[in-house]
Image (cartoon, rainbow, N blue to C red):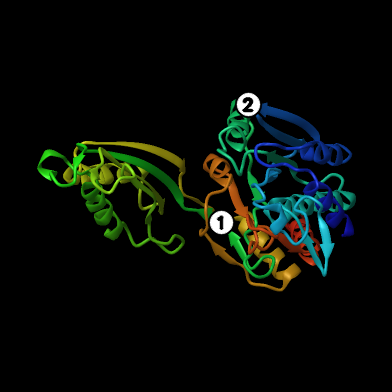
């Protein structure tokens, strides 16, 4: 399927740094309209979204992904310019090659090939594509799902093309994700001279004691599908820049990646209890980025497992590891959902790239999934 490689190149050459789409969705819509899809551009704020659907039969099978990419970093550090989509030594180089313009190209070409043989499949097909996955993710898939809910549209099955694979295409498939809860806490004290601590109240040891207790706590043991809940500190800020001043405030940012054994409300309550004991004068702001979700078994999981076996000769590992994805906005509606895409060793890095043969193999897996779901 050389057309997969050519479409991936065309997408990579569009400089779509989040939340910019840079014409990627127009190119995709043109390809899909030629197949009979009804394409609808949904723009919310600065974010472009594409909802494309073909057919009337149930169930509704959706491919989901994003056209936005992260910034390149210093472009002179790249072996090949990040938006030139250079093919060299069996690799396709460029920002978005793996995350996730290569996956998008494989999806589209797989559907083209599938429909050429099955013009009237027993599925309603859809694409949900956003330019806000790498950014705040508030005006993209989240808003599209709210719009679909208002219309009474429900996605039955969804394959998200995020780069899930570790060493070979299909070796890892994500069938769920942990929840993500972030907090930002500011502890107040009283500024003063370090030589006269009796006249001050140092917030640093108060906050440090609370964070130490939280870091050492075992929150749960996870379960068969989810690792234990993790608490990690990402930022700590305090001080005036002088070595003889006790500061007035200390601030920390932290994040939970949590299993279904926890709830964001319960985690917030436990953190506040610890802070109250160590640092009563505090303010905490929270961001609930996504709840845990999982697809345990069902027709889609079986189709994906069998397709990977046949097309890649692998027994896929089904995992809930990794960060967040837009699957967190789709799965809670009752959708059976998996994430299956290219290898992820170079995503977000300088010299992001993908093996050219990965694209053909991924397109073959996607087509095989469609064949099984339509049968």
Mark drawn on residue 246: none
Crowding at dot 1, Cα within 10 Å, few <14 / some 14-19 / many 20+, comes out as many
Crowd class of label 2 (few under 14; some 14 to 19; many from 20; radius 10 Å): few
Q: Earlier in the sequence, mark 2 or mark 1?
A: 2
Residue 166 visible in the displayed image: yes
Query: Quick check: 142 above or below 156?
Result: above
Task: Note whether residue 54 is visible.
Answer: no
Left or right side of 55 for 165: left
Where is residue 362 shown, x and y percent of the image?
A: 75, 61
Name the residue nearer the viewer: 212 or 203.
203
Q: Residue at position x 67%, y 50% from top?
A: 72
Indicate the quadrant containing the N terminus: top left, top right, bottom left or bottom right.
bottom right
Q: Which mark is residue 45?
A: 2
Query: Residue 292's x, y, as percent?
Result: 46, 49
> Total of numbered circles in the picture?
2
Q: Nearer the viewer, mark 2 or mark 1?
A: 2
Q: Quadrant of residue 93?
A: bottom right
Residue 249 lies, in percent from the top left, at: 28, 39
Look at 27% across and 42% down and name the residue there: 269
Residue under the point 75% across and 43% down: 15
Q: Residue furthest left?
A: 198
Position of 278 compared to 237: left or right? left
Per the image, the residue denoted by label 1 is: 175
Q: Residue furthest bottom?
A: 313
Q: Residue at 63% of width from left, 58% of height from top?
A: 349
Q: Secondary structure at mark 2?
A: loop
Residue 175 percent coordinates (x, y): 56, 56
Compared across the picture, whether 279 is left or right of 166 comes to left
């Amino acid at each position: 399927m050389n057309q997969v490689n050519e479409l991936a190149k065309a997408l990579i050459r569009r400089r779509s740094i989040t939340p910019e789409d840079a014409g990627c969705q127009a190119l995709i819509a043109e390809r899909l309209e030629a197949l009979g899809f009804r394409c609808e551009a949904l723009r919310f704020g600065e974010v472009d979204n594409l909802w494309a659907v073909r057919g009337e039969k149930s169930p509704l099978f959706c491919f989901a992904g994003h056209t936005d990419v992260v910034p390149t970093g210093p472009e002179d550090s790249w072996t090949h310019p990040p938006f030139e989509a250079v093919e060299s030594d069996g690799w396709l180089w460029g920002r978005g090659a793996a995350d996730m313009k290569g996956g998008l190209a494989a999806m589209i070409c797989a559907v083209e090939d599938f429909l050429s043989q099955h013009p009237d499949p027993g599925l309603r097909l859809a694409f949900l594509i956003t330019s806000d996955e790498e950014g705040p993710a508030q005006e993209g898939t989240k808003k599209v799902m709210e719009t679909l809910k208002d219309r009474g549209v429900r996605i039955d099955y969804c394959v998200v093309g995020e780069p899930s694979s570790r060493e070979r295409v299909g070796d890892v498939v994500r069938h769920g994700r942990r929840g993500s809860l972030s907090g930002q806490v500011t502890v107040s004290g009283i500024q003063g001279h370090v030589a006269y601590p009796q006249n001050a109240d140092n917030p640093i040891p108060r906050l440090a004691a609370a964070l130490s207790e939280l870091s050492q706590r075992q929150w749960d043991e996870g379960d068969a599908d989810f690792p234990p809940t993790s608490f990690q500190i990402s930022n700590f800020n305090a001080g005036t820049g002088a070595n003889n001043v006790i500061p007035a405030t200390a601030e920390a940012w932290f994040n939970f990646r949590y299993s279904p054994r926890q709830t964001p409300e319960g985690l917030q309550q436990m953190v506040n209890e610890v802070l109250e004991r160590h640092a009563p004068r505090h303010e905490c702001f929270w961001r609930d980025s996504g709840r845990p979700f999982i697809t345990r078994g069902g027709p889609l999981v079986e189709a994906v497992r069998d397709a990977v076996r046949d097309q890649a000769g692998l027994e896929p590992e089904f995992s809930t590891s990794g960060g967040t994805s837009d699957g967190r906005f789709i799965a809670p509606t009752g959708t059976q959902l998996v994430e299956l895409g290219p290898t992820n060793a170079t995503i977000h890095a300088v010299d992001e790239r993908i093996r050219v043969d990965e694209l053909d193999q991924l397109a073959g897996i996607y087509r095989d999934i469609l064949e099984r779901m339509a049968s």
